[in-house]
Image: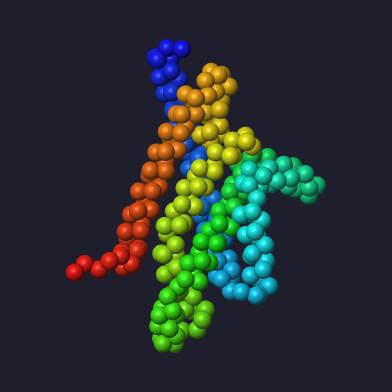
Amino acid sequence: MSEDSTLLLFVQTLWACIQALPTTLLLTGLSILIGLAIAIPLAVVHHRHTTVKERLVQGFIYFFTGTPLLVQIYIIYYGLPSFDWVADLMQQPGFGFLKDGFIWALMALTLNTAAYSTVIFSGSIRNTDAGEVEAARAYGMWPRQAMWRIILPSSLRRALPAYSNEVIMIMHATSLASTVTVSEMTNAASLIVSSSYRPFVAYSAAAVMYLLLTLILVGGFKLLEKRFMAHLGPRSQ
């Protein structure tokens, strides 16, 4: 193969990945937003020990952090529709979207990131400085008020570095959605491979796209950390 044909295939795959980029971004954004909405209240429950709710949350975390994400996708995509009530629901008017792999991949990614995010936020809550808690009590706040007004906002700010890694990992994990026929970037590259039989060039182009997205996310979180964690840095003399 000539260098020209290699470059042409690389550009062709890049364009295919760009066309599939909205699906990757939508899958990433929705799973992160919904997962975050699930993880925050679960983290508040999880940081308390020896309660029934905490044990239930711990079981949820143990399953989704203790099994491979690909297996979780297969369980949800192939397993749930095998139940009669789910199969019947998929045949009902207005529920045709359940036949699309996107919704099942989204469900798996959301639950997975919710579990990992719960661990991150729960650890940050436990590591809250005792002085912040004492200050909240000094203002006469009830424990619930102190949690939602003082402890949780402070914990979320301190969890940003670890949470940024989780967001990037989920963005990378969207590539697994290609295994259930979701037309995201890896799927686009795989289609090029199936017609060209040149996986190195095609998947290299996909890798470039993922690297660019990672660079953008890292830069975005650096700005957030600079904005919300400036008070934790060294004070200028």
Horizontally, is 153 left or right of 41 in the view? left
Asked if 149 appears above or below 58 in the picture, the reply is below
Is residue 168 something that shows in the picture? yes
Asked if 83 appears above or below 115 in the picture, the reply is above
Asked if 98 appears above or below 152 in the picture, the reply is above
The location of residue 101, given as percent across then percent down, is 64, 40
**Residue in the image at 65% along x and 59% along y:** 62
The location of residue 229, given as percent across then percent down, is 34, 63
Horizontally, is 55 left or right of 83 in the view? left
Q: How is the image coloured?
A: rainbow
Label tally: 0
Q: Residue furthest top?
A: 2
The location of residue 235, given as percent across then percent down, is 25, 68
Is residue 95 something that shows in the picture? no
The location of residue 61, given as percent across then percent down, is 62, 59
Q: Quadrant of the C terminus?
A: bottom left
**Residue in the image at 50% along x and 47% along y:** 169
**Closer to the camera, 99 or 68?**
68
**Residue in the image at 62% along x and 49% along y:** 107
Q: Residue furthest left?
A: 237
Horizontally, is 188 left or right of 235 in the view? right
Determine which quarter of the picture holds residue 99.
top right
